[in-house]
Image (cartoon, coloured by chain):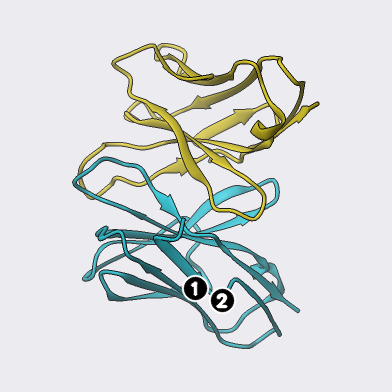
């Protein structure tokens, strides 16, 4: 969905490197989420934010940090990447006033060597 | 602890057949049950959703059946087409408003519809 964009779309990095994944949305939604997808494990929530001043850990936040720079921007950082962080990462948004539908970005494929 | 469990893990159906994907949940406070569809190289997108006040919801060829007492819901795809080949995730959340509103996803199943 072009309303939710993620950069970069693909990234290969080395163990120990710091990397940032960025998410921007033009939907005007207040809530934003970061998920990772692994084969056989489905979608797992890393962090979520219900507004600019609200940041919450998800089920697998260890090794990750986030920053909500503005209502439209939510970044995910890996301070020191490790190989088991190789995965497909998705950003999603939702509108607190219009139900629970989440709108996903196209994903970032991250490979940590 | 996996709160939302999907079955089967993968499914192969012939064109024109019925695809059935099941989902079981544990938390009786869940009150919103969506199905998301994901095509290769794309992010998941909402397909259809149901709330516990109804037992069935139909949108075109897609139907959700909901059994509150069994804590189960299922997705039925009638007249399955090759274009339905995708990964399907069930999810659940509670409540629909408030600070705890976040989705819990199942592990997903891959559906292949053979021509």
Instruction: Name the residue: 51% across, 69% down.
Output: A62
The quadrant of the image that shows the C terminus of chain A is: bottom right
* Left or right for B59, reference B106: left
User: What colour has chain B?
Assistant: yellow
Chain letter for the residue marked with disc 2 in the picture: A
Pinpoint residue B84: horizontal percent, then vertical percent. 65, 32
Instruction: Name the residue: 35% across, 47% down.
Output: B102
Q: Indicate the secondary structure of the residue bearing disc 2.
A: loop
* Left or right for B52, reference A58: left
Pinpoint residue A37: horizontal percent, then vertical percent. 60, 55
Which is nearer the N-term, disc 2 or disc 1?
2
**Are both tags, 2 and 1, on one chain?**
yes
Pinpoint residue B29: horizontal percent, then vertical percent. 32, 29
Tell me the CA gap for discs 2 and 1: 17 Å
Choose between A73 and A14: the one closer to the eye. Answer: A73
Residue A8's disc number: 2
**Which chain is represented by cyan in the image?**
A
Q: Are marks 2 and 1 in contact (CB under 8 Å)?
A: no
Instruction: Name the residue: 43% across, 33% down.
Output: B34
Does residue A68 sit above or below B52 in this rendering? below
Pinpoint residue B16: horizontal percent, then vertical percent. 71, 16
The residue furthest bottom is A17
Does residue A21 sit above or below A88 in this rendering? below
The residue furthest right is B115
Residue annotated with mark 1: A64
How packed mark 1 is, by other alpha carbons closer than 10 Å (few <14, some 14-19, many 20 or more), is some
Q: Indicate the secondary structure of the residue bearing disc 1.
A: loop
Q: Quadrant of residue B56?
A: top left
Instruction: Name the residue: 55% across, 25% down.
Output: B23
Choose between B39 and B27: the one closer to the eye. Answer: B39
How packed mark 2 is, by other alpha carbons closer than 10 Å (few <14, some 14-19, many 20 or more), is some
Does residue B78 sit above or below A112 in this rendering? above
């Amino acid at each position: 969905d072009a309303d939710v964009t993620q950069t970069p779309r693909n990234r290969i990095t080395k163990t120990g490197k710091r990397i940032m994944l960025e998410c921007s949305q033009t939907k005007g939604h207040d809530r934003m989420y970061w998920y990772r997808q692994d084969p056989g494990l489905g979608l797992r929530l890393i962090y979520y934010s219900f507004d600019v001043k609200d940041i919450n850990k998800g089920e697998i936040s260890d090794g990750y940090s986030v920053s909500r720079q503005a209502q439209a921007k939510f970044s995910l950082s890996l301070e020191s990447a490790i190989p088991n962080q190789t995965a497909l990462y998705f950003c999603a948004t939702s509108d607190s006033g219009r139900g629970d539908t989440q709108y996903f970005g196209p994903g970032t494929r991250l490979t940590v060597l | 602890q996996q709160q939302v469990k999907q079955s089967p893990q993968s499914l192969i159906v012939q064109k024109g057949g019925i695809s059935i994907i099941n989902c079981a949940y544990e938390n009786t406070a869940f009150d919103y049950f969506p199905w998301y569809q994901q095509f290769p190289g794309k992010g998941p997108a909402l397909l259809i959703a149901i709330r516990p006040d109804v037992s069935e919801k139909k949108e075109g060829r897609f139907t959700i059946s909901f059994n509150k007492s069994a804590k189960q819901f299922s997705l039925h795809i009638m007249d399955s087409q090759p274009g339905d080949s995708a990964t399907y995730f069930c999810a659940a959340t509670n409540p629909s408003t408030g600070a705890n509103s976040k989705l819990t996803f199942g592990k997903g199943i891959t559906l292949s519809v053979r021509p």
